[in-house]
Image (cartoon, rainbow, N blue to C red):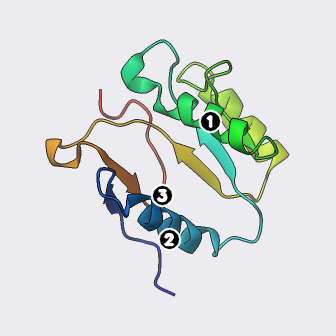
């Protein structure tokens, strides 16, 4: 299996986008023995920044047993991120953290889903 060091940009408008995203996620998840924690970052008060909490809410609606942190009713944002990060590392010390967040980027990546291995830097686009 190919190393997961690349960043993939998946055009959400294409019919195969869901399959490509599923393939890339399964490749990443295959490298980790424990189930992941889904960290859904964003503010429920700013429409353009609510992707993370919206996805978290939908994930729990479809699969209530998933370890999801960050929903519309209990969002993860800049003011509580440090506390939430400490909680995750105490509760799930070896788990892969899959972060879901809206982002600012180049116009050519508008409506794309970006997937890659590495850290997020909240507020880096501001």
Q: Nearer the viewer, residue 81 or 7?
A: 7
Q: Which residue is mark 2?
A: 23
* Corner quadrant of residue 124: top left
Q: Residue at 42% of width from left, 71% of height from top? A: 5
* Residue 61, position as x, y percentages in the image: 71, 36
Q: CA distance from mark 2 to mark 3?
A: 18 Å
* Corner quadrant of residue 71: top right
* Residue 116, position as x, y percentages in the image: 43, 61
* Residue 52, position as x, y percentages in the image: 52, 34
Q: Circle 1 sits in a helix, a strand or a loop, which is it?
A: helix
Label 2 or label 1, whichever comes before in sequence order:
2
Q: Is 25 positioned to the left or the right of 37 in the image?
A: left
Q: Residue furthest front?
A: 15
Q: Which residue is mark 1?
A: 58
Contact (Cβ within 8 Å) of mark 2 with mark 1: no
Q: Residue at 52% of width from left, 43% of height from top? A: 100
Of badges 3 and 1, the one in the foreground is 1
Q: Which residue is mark 3?
A: 118
Q: Circle 2 sits in a helix, a strand or a loop, which is it?
A: helix
Label 3 or label 1, whichever comes before in sequence order:
1
Q: Residue furthest left?
A: 108
Q: CA distance from mark 2 to mark 1?
A: 20 Å
Q: Residues within 10 Å of mark 3 (few under 14, many from 20)?
A: few
Label 2 or label 3, whichever comes before in sequence order:
2
Q: Residues within 10 Å of mark 2 (few under 14, many from 20)?
A: few
Q: Circle 3 sits in a helix, a strand or a loop, which is it?
A: loop
Q: Nearer the viewer, residue 67 or 80?
A: 67
Q: Residue at 65% of width from left, 46% of height from top? A: 38
Identify whether 30 is placed above or below 100: below
* Corner quadrant of residue 60: top right
Q: CA distance from mark 3 to mark 1?
A: 24 Å
* Residue 12, position as x, y percentages in the image: 33, 51
């Amino acid at each position: 299996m190919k190393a997961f060091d690349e960043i993939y940009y998946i055009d959400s408008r294409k019919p195969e986008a869901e399959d490509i995203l599923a393939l890339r996620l399964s490749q990443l998840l295959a490298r980790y023995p424990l189930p992941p924690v889904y960290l859904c970052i964003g503010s429920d008060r700013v429409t353009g920044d609510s992707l993370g909490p919206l996805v978290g809410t939908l994930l729990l609606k479809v699969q209530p047993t998933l370890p999801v942190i960050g929903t519309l009713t209990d969002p993860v944002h800049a003011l509580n991120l440090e506390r939430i990060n400490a909680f995750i590392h105490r509760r799930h010390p070896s788990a892969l953290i899959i972060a879901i967040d809206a982002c600012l980027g180049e116009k050519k990546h508008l409506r794309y889903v970006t997937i890659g291995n590495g850290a997020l830097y909240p507020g880096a686009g501001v």
